[in-house]
Image (cartoon, rainbow, N blue to C red):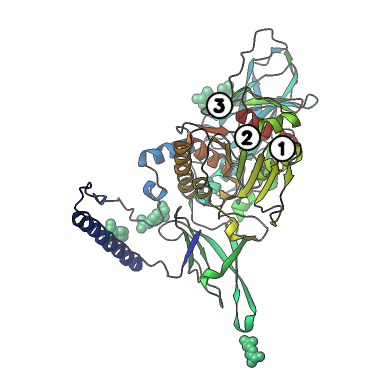
Amino acid sequence: MVMPSTEKSNASVCRLRQYALLLAFLWTSFCLVLWALNSGIHIKQFQPPRPVLVPRNNNSSIISAVDMGISNEEWERLQKALDWPIPDQEITHLIQSTSPVHSTFSIVGLKESYKVGEKISVNITARDHNNNLKRYGGDFFKAKLFNTELKASVYGEVVDHRNGTYSVALLLPWEGQAQVFVRLEHSSEVVQILKKYTESSFPRTHFNGYFEGSGPNKTRIREVVECNLKWGADGSWRKGNFCCEYKDIKTGTVWQCERPKKLSCDKLVRHSGGRLENPLNLLEQQLFSKKLTNVAISGDKKILNVLPNTAAIGTMEKCRSGMTTPVPAGFYLKDVWKSFVCNTRQFSSAQMGNCLKNKIVYLMGDSTTRQWFEYLEKTVPGIKRMDLHTLPAGGPLMAVELKNNIIIHWRVHGVPLRFGKVMPITDLHYISNDIDEIAGGRHAVIVFTYCAHLVFHPITFYVYEVAKIRQSVVALLSRAPETTVIIKSGNTAGLKNIFQSDWHMLQLNTVMREMFRDIDGVIFIDVWQMTSCHYLIENIHPGPVIIANEVDMLLSYVCPT
Ligand SMILES: *[C@@H]1O[C@H](CO)[C@@H](O)[C@H](O)[C@H]1NC(C)=O
Ligand SMILES: *[C@@H]1O[C@H](CO)[C@@H](O)[C@H](O)[C@H]1NC(C)=O
Ligand SMILES: *[C@@H]1O[C@H](CO)[C@@H](O)[C@H](O)[C@H]1NC(C)=O
Ligand SMILES: *[C@@H]1O[C@H](CO)[C@@H](O)[C@H](O)[C@H]1NC(C)=O
Ligand SMILES: *[C@@H]1O[C@H](CO)[C@@H](O)[C@H](O)[C@H]1NC(C)=O
């Protein structure tokens, strides 16, 4: 899977390598032509590809669309979708930042009662610590409507007017009472910091590489060193003696490790997440303080009365690929997610078994798809986990049900991956490579998520990786159009530090959705709203109630009605 090389990637060595490749290529072309002439048959003359002048940036810290494997137009579109306003002034004092204490929300045109299906408009006003109105946007607010007794809630999208005011339209989807809840997840001053470090090559996370090999007298030698991603022309992160490079031949992704003292580069056998490195200065740390992030803001706490509405509610379409996620995408009522995307339903245990009959389900990605695996394993009647002699948290995992011929696999994606557990590096596969090795067809259900572990790295790297996955998905759907391909978005996690924040997750979700927007045959299950508005405290691993609803959504696409 991975090819080690010990050379320091030095520009002149690289150029030499390119010449050598070019020579080898010309020689091969020449031989092919000779062979064709000699054998006397008329085959179409092989046309070598014309060399294309790639506009190279004269600044190694800037990564171009070409480096990411996408067109300039697509990169421009992505940048537009990712655009997020930031302060228009230099921040030198905490008091300049948005204060959750002074910021407020109000319901526009509050009425005595409402009807199901009506919308209310909420106006958020951001103020700084001196109680002055903010003049610029960029604050990250989250808004919802809820009713605790009914276990009901719905998500609202916050629109940034870029002048310190924000508005939210909230649907009133259930009958009974409802209350508005708004919180400040991050001030725009914090978003600016998140942005800065997302775009920089500062390594906020490190990883451990475990080397093992035989020493003299048949002893085993073990060494642990630091490893990280190599990204960008300058290698992004190069400190100390990083000269073991591991390039995945198919994806082109380069992993690098410090050179172990006794063992050679090819003795890398295991991997785990390593230390975190905090780049924040004192002021930046203050802006991130607990009191200021993910805090409820005050406003109209009035209980809204929502009356029944006899007007017919339209029937939902059958779940299929190519559906967009509206806002709201659905709402919770008595712990059940009622989707507005398509006709989802709740599956009983027996119905789950029937739905998955004769299916091979490939769950890929991270621990959030492992939660789906564990839920299916617990709920599908008669299903049993095979002992693959792997760690339960790290996998790969596999469960089978013989009567209905159901197979479920789960595997984590390739490096960078921040699992705490030490895992064989051979078990970490790039999603695109695994998809390339699946024949596909109507029995195959491929589900992947790719978000939570990527928040530590430049977004340009994420684009590069998603472009590879997209290539593999397009090829799969071309060879086996009946394959079910499902992308699960990242969920909100309530994470709010410089390492991981829901703001990062939101940005990555945007990239994934945009890059798959025009790919026919792909299903995008957006779980962001499902986790953002739920009454459980947000967690990177959503609670069992949410997972059950997510899996019902999955099965509604696998077995639509
Ligand atoms: C790149 O930039 C450097 C310094 O700004 C300059 O000296 C050099 O000529 C530039 N190279 C190219 C190929 O433009
Ligand atoms: C390269 O780009 C970075 C980031 O935009 C900038 O800080 C740096 O000054 C640039 N270097 C050159 C030589 O232009
Ligand atoms: C929101 O409230 C602020 C402050 O009360 C007000 O200035 C602004 O015009 C309101 N915006 C809307 C869209 O109602
Ligand atoms: C901010 O912009 C919105 C939308 O353009 C406008 O309705 C509102 O009055 C503005 N508020 C202030 C305080 O300028
Ligand atoms: C290997 O074994 C020999 C003989 O027992 C011993 O002399 C030598 O020191 C050992 N070498 C190492 C590196 O332990």
Number of marks in picture: 3
* Residue 311 location, quadrant: top right
Q: Earlier in the sequence, mark 2 or mark 3?
A: 3
Residue extending furthest front? 40
Q: Identify residue type, mark 2.
A: Val
Q: Earlier in the sequence, mark 2 or mark 1?
A: 1
138 on left or right of 21: right
Q: Is mark 3 within 8 Å of ligand 4?
A: no
* Residue 334 location, quadrant: top right
Q: Nearer the viewer, residue 79 or 49?
A: 49
Q: Which mark is residue 403?
A: 1
Q: Secondary structure at mark 1?
A: loop
Percent x, y of residue 77: 42, 36
The residues tagged by marks 2 and 3 sit, at their Cα atoms, a distance apart of 16 Å
Q: Which residue, given by chain and number where applicable, does mark 2 sit on?
A: 527
- Please, is residue 525 above or below residue 501 in the view? above
Q: Which residue, given by chain and number where applicable, does mark 3 sit on?
A: 320
Q: Secondary structure at mark 3?
A: loop
Percent x, y of residue 347: 71, 28
Q: Residues within 10 Å of mark 3 (few under 14, many from 20)?
A: some
Residue extending furthest top? 310
Residue plotted at (60% across, 77% down): 214
Front of the two marks 2 and 3:
3
Percent x, y of residue 18: 31, 62
Q: Earlier in the sequence, mark 3 or mark 1?
A: 3
Q: Are marks 2 and 3 in contact (CB under 8 Å)?
A: no
Q: Identify residue type, mark 1.
A: Lys
Q: Identify residue type, mark 3.
A: Arg
Residue plotted at (35% across, 65% down): 14
